[in-house]
Amino acid sequence: MKENEMNEKEINLLDLITVFFNWLKKITNSIIKFVGGIFQLIFRHLLITIIVTLVCILISLYLTRPEARTYKADALALLYGCDAQTVREISKQLEYISEEEGYSSLSSKLSLPDSITKNIVGFHTYFVISYLKDGIAVKVDYKDIYPLKDLKDTLYVKMRDRVSMQLLVKNTKQIPQIQKAILDYFNNNELLKIRLESFKDQMNQQIYISGIELKRVDSLARVTYFKDNQQQIRLEQNKLLFGEQQKQLFYGDLLKLQDIISSSKSALANTKNPIALVSGFAVDPKPVNGIIKYGVYSVIIGIIISLIISVLIENLTKIIKYLKTRP
């Protein structure tokens, strides 16, 4: 009885394997027939395919001509007194310039001549992502795929003190002028200037309060260090302590206060404007609309369009008949 059941299971497994390979064979044959049909269609209408593809290639060559090539430049902006979300909201005035407004609107916002702003293709700002909240930037959120509701996630965090800026231009020689105009646009914003002054006041208060506390702790430490404490063994919070346990705490407090003062002074020294670029805009030498990239796209698009035209031509009679048929 058991042997029969095992034989039936083996037969069922063989049947399943046979069915799977038959299905795989059927799919493979269908793909081969489909690809073969495309080649037959291209061969029957070879002239149309060649003409349409050449037209697409010519269009790609026009779009990638030297004066139309677009270059990408990225920069990391450090923020003082303001946060990344606020800066991104302010940058929308530059990002959402409509085609009707054109470069004339950019000229007024950036105080640049039209001869420069007409070469600006686009400007965008992005959040910078730091994993494990270690304060080290590891990724730029170019696609805005990190929603605000997930900011408490322990795997990543949107950094509040920096944003990534991306500039798309046609003339890379004008980038220094554009960079200066963009920084002036942000640093002259009234909201950012107010927050910068508030940030400076906060740092000064931290330095002042920490200085007073540093003197107090230092005085308390001197008294404690030179005090003859005879209590060497005592019970505290259900713990038996040997020796003086509090003297080292003053050393830690002194270091912590000194660290606060040093970091506050360093922040004040760097805080001259609401926004500062780490090293300016770095230009990618490869154009966004490169010849090879657009050439490949043009061939693919040309073949697809020619296939559609060929299908329409071969079924023209049926299409006309269908359109003339009354419902």
Image: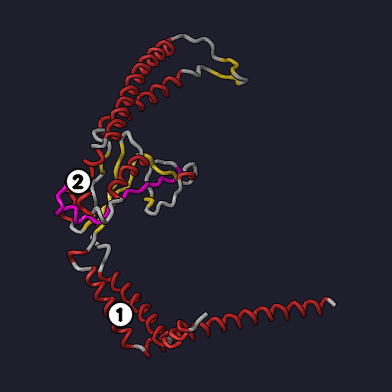
252 over 68 or under it: above or below? above
Asked if residue 126 lies left or right of residue 116, the reply is: right
Q: Which mark is residue 32?
A: none
Give x and y (percent) for residue 111: 17, 45
210 relative position to 244: left or right = left
Viewer-proximal residue among 209 and 313: 313
Is 312 situated left or right of 103 in this image?
right
Numbered tag placed on residue 53 in the rendering: 1
Residue appearing at x 23%, y 72% in the figure: 61
- Residue at 52 percent across and 83 percent down: it is 30
The percent position of residue 148, horizontal first and vertical second, equals 45, 44
Labels in figure, total: 2
User: Magenta includes 111?
Assistant: yes
Whole-angstrom CA distance, mark 2 to mark 1, is 42 Å
* Residue 112 to residue 229: above or below: below
Is residue 73 visible to us here?
Answer: no
Q: Could you tell me which residue is drawn at 35 percent across and 88 percent down?
A: 45
The residue that disc 2 covers is 108
- Judged from this view, the residue extending furthest toward the front is 326
The three-letter code of the residue at mark 2 reads Ser
Q: What's drawn in magenta, residue-wise? A: 109-132
Seen in the picture, residue 280 relative to 269 is either above or below; the reply is below
- In the image, residue 256 above or below residue 27: above
**Front residue (pair 142, 235):** 142
Q: Secondary structure at mark 1?
A: helix
Q: Nearer the viewer, residue 130 or 152?
A: 152
